[in-house]
Image (tube, rainbow, N blue to C red):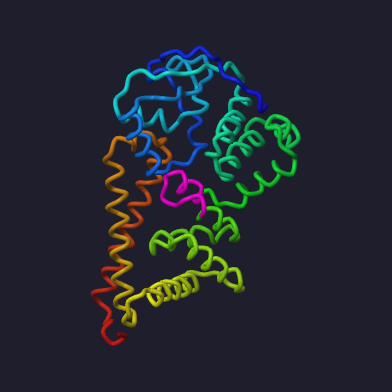
Amino acid sequence: MDNIETNKNIIQVPISKLSDKHANFRIISPSSEKAHIKLIQKFGIVKPLIVSPIINKESNYEIIDGFKRYRACKYLGINEVPVSVLDINNRVLKAGIIIFNNKSRSISDIEESMVVFSLYKNDNLTQVEIGTLLNKHKSWVCRRIALITRLEQQIINTLRLGLINISTCRELSRLPRGNQEKVMITIIEYNLKILEVKKLIDNLLEGYIINSNKIIELTEDIIENRANKSKQPQKKISNLYMFKQKLNVIEAIIVFLSKRTNQKYFEKFSNDDQNHLLNIIDKLIVLLNRLHDQFNKRNFEKQI
């Protein structure tokens, strides 16, 4: 399948005739989305989208490669885009998402896993058949399926929204299912860097019990070490300071997510992803209100 080639004849197609049904196999990166918008504003659409014809009342072509360009064009209000047409079936179309992006090394192992798992579960292909389709060994296919099945669905949904990155998702896959979401929420709340995420998960896996108290305890140790490593002398971090930091982070996340729901590119999410994002905002608001109540009632000054 490495020798897939598109039709060399590039045609202009109304953007309304394109379907991005398979965009859920790619992870949204806000910085990459902005970069594509700026590039298209400055240079236009340099590389055509790769599409496959479909029979549908609403759309004529299914996008195989060029989802970020497609979203950027929609955001900029561009009505027509250049496309290169490849006439293939649905299974090969999914395989093409991996093949075309492998050439530019712009697809992660998590994204590959989502495509492979869909071929395995939804298209009922065996691991050997998937390997043949992608020109990969069966062991490679097995590893990709194992990676996606280790992850909780909530982690995948949050990853698709761009609220965590792929490296964090990869680290979370090391944890047993049932514990990943609690750790993910803490990672977002404390804005942990990837090395801090790795350290947190390493420490959690060394113990026998993973619970909310242990997660917070280990995370606060990491945050305190972060401050101690600063070049400037640091004051001892008080419980009151840490509590205020949590409130500030949660408020910042709520503002960040709320702005997203009011921007044009929120429309690119599916209805399920939109509902998931709104549910996250609701949960964070409830958590913020509860923490504010605790902050006002408890006498933290005694702990400073």
Please, is residue 185 above or below residue 267 in the view? below
Q: Residue at x 71, y 36 (%)?
A: 136
Query: For the stretch drawn in magenta, what is the main secondary structure?
Result: helix
| Viewer-closest of 257 and 76 | 76
Q: Residue at x 57, y 68 (%)?
A: 202
Residue 124 lies, in percent from the top left, at 68, 32
Residue range corresponding to the magenta coloring: 154-167
| Viewer-closest of 34 and 190 | 34
Please, is residue 245 above or below residue 8 in the view? below
| Viewer-closest of 9 and 289 | 9
Please, is residue 13 above or below residue 225 in the view? above
Residue 95 lies, in percent from the top left, at 62, 30
Q: Which image quadrant is residue 70 in?
A: top left
Q: Residue at x 37, y 49 (%)?
A: 279
Q: Quadrant of the N terminus?
A: top right
Please, is residue 248 above or below residue 82 in the view? below
Q: Residue at x 55, y 43 (%)?
A: 108
In the picture as drawn, the residue positioned furthest to the bottom comes out as: 302
Residue 77 lies, in percent from the top left, at 29, 25
Residue 52 lies, in percent from the top left, at 53, 19
| 20 left or right, relative to 88 | left
Q: Quadrant of the C terminus?
A: bottom left
Residue 201 is one of the magenta-drawn residues: no
| Viewer-closest of 102 and 154 | 102
User: How many dots with numbers?
Assistant: 0
| 164 left or right, relative to 92 | left
